[in-house]
Image (cartoon, grey):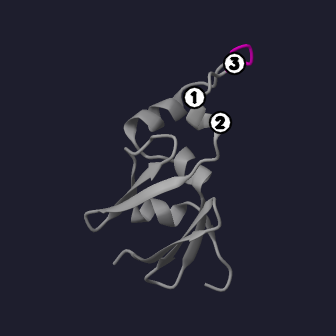
């Protein structure tokens, strides 16, 4: 059986900690979670070639603020939906994906 989250907690203003049923604890920055969003539009954007250095990105007001995790809701018995302060909320983060992301905290 796949390990399941048993506890979610915020660590400071920019990190999430998840404890799993097998005793593993993983720590994620909000930026890492946002950058690895599994939704179709984010996957497509990541597969595009990077813009040329001559093109300057246009930032929205939300892009200029520190990224925050606003909400995290269960999706069935296999994933979480995460809402970020930049307005993005379409990614469904499976437990398996969450186990692959982040870093393992020593001692757990």
Above or below for 10 versus 108: above
| Element type at mark 2 | helix
Which residue occupies the foreground of this view, 97 or 7?
7
Q: CA distance from mark 1 to mark 3?
A: 13 Å
Q: Is residue 94 above or below residue 10?
A: above
Residue at the image point whose x is 60% and y is 35% from the top: 63
Q: CA distance from mark 2 to mark 1?
A: 7 Å
Residue range highlighted in magenta: 52-56
| Left or right side of 104 for 84 | left
Q: Which residue is mark 1?
A: 60
- Front residue of 95/81: it is 81
Q: Is residue 88 above or below residue 6?
A: above
Q: Position of residue 55 (x, y in %)?
A: 68, 15
Label disc, if present, on residue 64 of the rendered structure: 2
Identify the element where label 1 is drawn: loop
Task: Report helix, strand or loop for mark 3.
Answer: loop
Q: Nearer the viewer, residue 22 or 79?
A: 79
Task: Name the quarter where the C terminus is drawn.
Answer: bottom right
Q: Residue at x 42, y 57 (%)?
A: 71
Q: Residue 26 occupies which quadrant of the picture?
A: bottom right
Magenta-drawn stretch, dominant element (helix, strand or loop): loop
The image position of residue 61, as x and y in percent, is 59, 32
Mark 2 touching mark 1, by CB under 8 A?
yes
**Which dot marks residue 56?**
3
Residue farthest to the right, as pictured: 53
Task: Report, in whole angstroms, how far the alpha carbon at label 3 lies from the one at label 2.
Answer: 15 Å
Between circles 3 and 2, the one closer to the viewer is 2
Screen quadrant of the N terminus: bottom left
């Amino acid at each position: 059986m796949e390990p399941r989250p048993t506890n979610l907690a915020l660590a400071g203003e920019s990190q999430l900690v998840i404890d799993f049923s097998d005793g593993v604890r993983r720590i994620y920055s909000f930026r890492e979670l946002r950058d690895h969003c599994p939704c179709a539009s984010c996957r497509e954007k990541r597969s595009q070639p990077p813009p040329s250095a001559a093109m300057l990105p246009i930032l929205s007001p939300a892009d200029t603020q520190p990224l925050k995790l606003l909400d995290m809701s269960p999706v069935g018995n296999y994933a979480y939906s995460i809402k970020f302060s930049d307005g993005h909320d379409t990614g469904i983060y499976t437990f398996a994906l969450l186990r692959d992301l982040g870093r393992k905290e020593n001692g757990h």
